[in-house]
Image (cartoon, grey):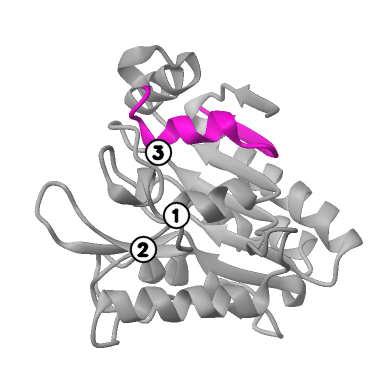
Amino acid sequence: MPFSVEVIESRLFAGVVADELVASIQDIETEQEFCTIALAGGSTPAETYRLLSHPPRVNEINWPKLKLFLSDERWVPASDAQSNFKMIQETLLARIPSNGWSVYQVDTSMKSPEEAARKYSELIRANLSLDSSGVPVFDIILLGIGSDGHIASIFPGSKTFSESSSLFEVVPQPWDGNFRVTITPKLIMAARRVIVIAKGKAKADIIKKVIEGNDSNLNLPGRLLMEHPGDVSYFV
């Protein structure tokens, strides 16, 4: 379970993460027909996405070879200010060349989040290669982490953290019960590379707890990354 931690000055944070993504994508694009990525939502990656959509970085990626997915989504319309897809659309997708790249969003117009989670799982199975156990394999998963240790929408105490064998699950937000559709540990653990971004002191403190892993921190969802068999990188 190799992992690395890079501590970055705040004003340089988004650029360093953007450069790391470009380098990883370029490596994969030289080896494979497509590069599959699960993008993080929330506020932390927004500036990184903006940097990826502008020169010089936008010209360093072969965009038609990308298949882009979301790691999680709030159960709100795609036009809602809380929508992860809306944020990614505005900061990245609307600004990059439109010649052939593919993006797959969680369809929040469906009748239920459970139906949307099933449909999204089917899309992933249809577009990703499978490992020896039949689990789809993302080339890169980009994750943020909350000050409570949650990753994607896998919250402390969530059944998605401890029990799920599905690819995507529906979970309630602990503070208000509103639903989210989230990637599950099964998919995260199968990924070739996981990049975790944690900007600010509160996020840095939780990364420290995740890595130290004393008994009081074992229920943090971020802890599952310490068992990841692939490449995990923390940018703090």
Residue 230: within the magenta? yes
- Is 148 on the left or on the right of 178, as rendered? right
Q: Is residue 55 above or below residue 45?
A: below
Of the numbered discs 3 and 1, the one sitting upstream in the chain is 3
Whether residue 19 is visible: yes
Local SS, label 3: loop
Residue 120 place in picture, x, y as percent = 46, 76
From the image, tell me which residue sits under label 1: 184
Front in this rendered view, residue 167 or 30: 167
Q: Distance between the residues labelled 2 and 1?
A: 7 Å
For disc 3, the marked residue is: 145
Q: Residue at x 37, y 81 (%)?
A: 107
For the residues labelled 3 and 1, say whether their Cβ atoms are less than 8 Å apart.
no
The 10 Å Cα crowd at callout 2, few under 14, some 14 to 19, many 20 or more, is many
Q: Could you give the CA–CA distance between mark 3 and mark 1, rounded to whole angstroms? A: 14 Å
> Image quadrant for the N terminus?
top right
Image point (56%, 60%), residue name: 38
* Numbered label tally: 3
User: At x 37% / y 23%, what residue is drawn?
Assistant: 218
Q: Pinpoint residue 68: horizontal percent, then vertical percent.
A: 59, 69
Q: Magenta stretch: residue 165 in it? A: no
**Crowd band around label 1 with a 10 angstrom C-alpha radius: few (<14), some (14–19), many (20+):** many
- For badge 1, the amino acid type reads Thr
103 left or right of 177?
Answer: right
Residue closer to the observer: 236 or 156? 156
Of labels 2 and 3, the one closer to you: 2
- Secondary structure under tag 2 reads strand
Numbered range of the magenta stretch = 218-236
Q: Which residue position holds label 2?
A: 169
Q: What residue type is labelled 3?
A: Ile
